[in-house]
Image: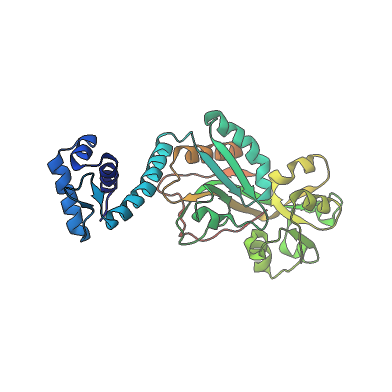
Amino acid sequence: MIEIKHLKTLQALNHCGSLAAAANYLYQTQSALSHQFSELEHRLGFKLFIRKSQPLQLTPQGEVLLRLAEQVLPLITASLHECNEPEQTNLRIAIECHSCIQWLTPALRRFRESWPQVNVDFKSGVTFDPQPALQQRELDIVLTSDIIADSNLHYIPLFDYEVKLVIAPDHPLANKRNIHPQDLAAETLLIYPVQKHRFDIWRRFLQPADVTPTLKTVDNTLLLIQMVAARLGIAALPHWAVETFEKQGLVVTKTLGKGLWSRLYAASREGEQHQPAINTFIRSARQHAVDNLPFVKQVSVSRDDEPKGTQQSNCLQW
């Protein structure tokens, strides 16, 4: 019912003090401006200003709408400025996977070469649930393997990656080429402190075979790998999280079954995925991962087949 032009006109009317001055300020004729107000007042059912008052006086209802204009118009101006100059913005990113930071930091350097003026802020934590924060506009991008069904979020695939079983070099399973679910029945599986059904090793590997190893939670990736090296348990992680430790001979990685693969997504609010800064960051992160990470597969992405929030949920691996 009330349009932006009405709020701008009301603000100009209050600022100029008369209908004639406001019309001149807005580059309109006085008759056109008067007709606009008459039509709006008829639709609203109340008067907005007292005609023939000197200086012009707003009615109580006009004062209410003036306050609305003073609140809304600056927000619109700032948003349009951000759209026209996206490099002058903040990019708030949350990472559900702790191990992602190991490859995302160099990927960020690649992004900053194109967007040096973007202020990037990271948030993470085992107990932090970032997707609701994304929905509430507290974040701009979330890297996740979980898809919330029927949400207002848009999920763009980054890449597929293989989850590896991580064990100590002298572990009895180190000599096996492929690992079967029954091989883990008597083991202690180290996981992050989130619901076990969010882990693909549980949902897609162990549970279908009715295998239930002992579960122990660890809230730090480095500590988790050190515990594996000390024969205090085993873990299932993306290879990039343990590559350095494997090269040092502290751990070894094994294939789970025929290969346990998952997909990482970049989630943003629906309609914002094509904003220049967000789009460039996602492309930079995807390309860096495909170019540099082992056991990673490129995902074919088009505007039509990018997954939406109505798809089935994937689960965590890290």
Which residue is most to the bottom?
A: 210
Residue found at x 30% / y 44% = 11
Q: Residue at x 43, y 42 (%)?
A: 274
Query: The N terminus appears in which quarter of the rendering?
Result: bottom left
Q: Residue at x 25, y 42 (%)?
A: 17
**Occupied quadrant, residue 195:** bottom right
Q: Nearer the viewer, residue 121 or 206?
A: 121
Q: How many marks?
A: 0
Is 129 positioned to the left or the right of 267 in the image? right
Closer to us: 173 or 194: 194
Q: Is residue 2 left or right of residue 149?
A: left
The answer to whether residue 291 of the structure is visible from this angle is no
Q: Is residue 78 left or right of residue 293?
A: left
> Residue 203 appears at what percent x and percent y?
64, 64
Residue 120, compared with residue 178, is above or below; it is above
From where the camera sits, is residue 123 visible?
yes
Q: Nearer the viewer, residue 86 or 150?
A: 86
From the viewer's perspective, tell me whether residue 43 is left or right of residue 11.
Answer: left
Please state which of residues 141 and 37 is positioned toward the viewer in this rendering: 37
